[in-house]
Structure formats: C-alpha cells, structure tokens
Image (cartoon, rainbow, N blue to C red):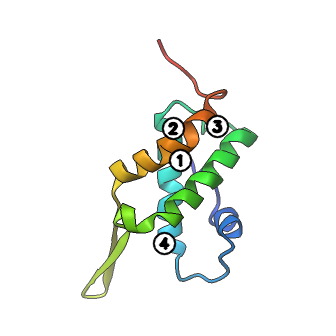
Amino acid sequence: MVAVLTLAEAKAHLKIAGNDEDEAISILIDAAGDYLGRIGCPIGADPLAPSLKAAALIAVQQLYATRPQLALTRDTVEGVGSQTFDHTAADRILSATLDRLVASVREVTI
C-alpha cells in the first residue's frame, strides 16, 4: 500500500512532538490510506491531489481523536507488542467525515 502521508506530516498536523505514539499514528495513516483507496480515490498518484492530502490529514485527525472507539490498544506479551484496530468503526467515522471532501476525485467504476 502507498502511504498517503508521512509520519512527520501526520505528527505535525496533530501537533505531536514526541515519539511515544509513532506506532499508533502509523496505523492510523495506513487506515486512512486504506479507506481512501477502498472508496475509489487515486491514492497512488504522484503527487497526491491536494484534496486527498487534506482528506488523509483529516482522517488521521478524526481517527486519533476517536481512538477509544477504535480499540487501538497495545498488547505486550513477553516483550512482543501488537496493535489491534477496529476497521468497521474506522470506516463509520471516516465515511461521515470524508465522503463529500473526496467526491470530486473518486474514480467510479460502473
């Protein structure tokens, strides 16, 4: 999958300076890109359309703000960490926020 944002871009948008949440934010970036790709946005374009870059930033911001609803947790067993993520909840949150913003750049297949 093509990353729609860099970790640095997402952290700057969220105004996060430390590195404690890098893994979680990276998961949110991937979820935003996955969602945009699944709804027909051309996320592989280089450069990414400004409206898609904005959509990705807004998506990460929305997902970050609603982390408790996403079950974004870190489980550590014997020093090995893993993340869990509720994609259904993420889709629900993002569809309410992003669908209108990206409507003009979506690729619709009939």
Secondary-structure class at tag 1: helix
Residue 23 is tagged as 4
Q: Are marks 1 and 2 in contact (CB under 8 Å)?
A: yes
Type of amino acid at the residue the image marks with label 2 = Gly
Q: CA distance from mark 4 to mark 1?
A: 16 Å
Dot 1 amino acid type: Gly
Q: Is residue 47 visible?
A: no
Residue that numbered label 3 is attached to: 101
Of the two numbered discs 2 and 4 on the same chain, state the one appearing first in sequence: 4
Alpha carbon of mark 1 to alpha carbon of mark 2: how far?
Answer: 6 Å
Q: Residue furthest front?
A: 96
Front position in the image: 109 or 1: 109
Going by the image, does 42 lie left or right of 77? right
Q: Earlier in the sequence, mark 3 or mark 4?
A: 4
At a point 66% along the width and 41% down the height, the residue shown is 52
Closer to the camera: disc 3 or disc 4?
3
Image position of 88 with respect to 81: above or below: above
Query: Mark 4: which amino acid?
Result: Glu
Circle 4 SS class = helix
Where residue 100 appears, as percent x and y from the top left, is 60, 34
Residue at image location 42% in from the left, 52% down from the top = 90
The residues bearing labels 3 and 2 have C-alpha atoms spaced at a distance of: 14 Å
User: Which residue has dot 2 on it?
Assistant: 37
Percent of width and height locating residue 42: 60, 33
Q: Secondary structure at mark 3?
A: helix
Q: Residue furthest bottom?
A: 78
Observer-side mark, 1 or 3, equals 3
Q: Residue furthest left?
A: 77
Above or below, 105 against 88 in this view is above
User: Residue beneath label 1, please?
Assistant: 33
